[in-house]
Image (spheres, grey):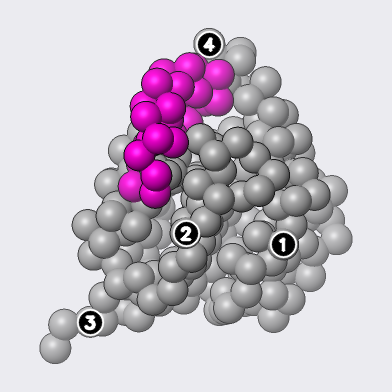
Amino acid sequence: MGFYIDRIVPRLVDISCGLKFTEPTRRRVCAGLHGRVVEIGFGSGLNVPFYPPDLDSVSAVEPADLGWKLAAKRLSVSPVTVDRAGVDGQSLPFLDNSFDSALSTWTMCTIPDIDAALREVRRVLRPGGTLHFVEHGLAPDAGVQKWQHRLEPIQKTVAGGCHLTRDIPALLTDAGFDIRELDVFYEKSTPKVVGAYSLGYAAAPPARL
């Protein structure tokens, strides 16, 4: 599985997540990012063209060397400074309160310990900083959920550990985030089992007095 995960999955993700229909969604989720940004699951840099051009910097967290290499062309024309600053979303190499914004797009499905990753994002965000997200996860309809549970073992095998049944809003709330905006919908261009999206932003809790 090492060769498949290291050499095949990043290319599959680059192709499937780079389809034209994803662009309006990426534009929506990147709107409002500001200051210093940490992006969890940077992948092949598919969000780079949609970063606000006045960002101070982006610290990219991406475990796949091939994903970073595939991002080279996008990075070469970006007005925003992007550094590969970490490889594990579950253990971020940053000081507390280091970032103004965080970004996660179709990433929370694959991180093995998503609770630990969200605690880390909360830790490195300044109080009141915002996590912008779009993720697929547990569908709002019982019939779709049934198929998600049936297909999840296959999905995890072929898609690098991708889960179909994670409840994204609940995970964010349990990690201490305050969801400020949330749109739950089915992406029309994908099957419902993988197209149940949660898009919005959530704020890290304010500093204690």
Q: Which residue matches tag 2?
A: 184
Q: Are marks 3 and 2 in contact (CB under 8 Å)?
A: no
| Vertical arrangement, residue 53 with respect to residue 102, above or below | below
**What is the span of residues highlighted in magenta in the rendered image?**
140-167
How far apart marks 3 and 4 lie (CA) works out to 43 Å
Q: Amino acid at mark 4?
A: Met
Q: From this viewpoint, which residue is outermost toward the bottom?
A: 209
Pick whichever of labels 1 and 4 is earlier in the sequence: 4
Q: Which residue is mark 4?
A: 1
Q: What's the CA distance linking mark 1 and mark 4?
A: 33 Å
Measured Cα–Cα span from mark 3 to mark 1:
34 Å
Q: Is residue 177 visible?
A: yes
Q: Nearer the viewer, mark 3 or mark 1?
A: 1
Labels 2 & 1 near each other (Cβ < 8 A): no
Q: Helix, strand or loop at disc 2? A: strand
Q: Which residue is mark 1?
A: 24
> CB atoms at circles 3 and 4 under 8 Å apart?
no
Q: Which residue is mark 3?
A: 207
Label 2: few (<14), some or many (≥20) within 10 Å?
some
Q: Secondary structure at mark 4?
A: loop
Mark closer to the observer (1, 4)? 1
Query: Quick one: label 1, few (<14), some, or many (20+) residues within 10 Å?
Result: few
Residue 204 falls left or right of residue 20: left
Relative depth, front residue between 45 and 194 = 194
Q: Earlier in the sequence, mark 3 or mark 1?
A: 1
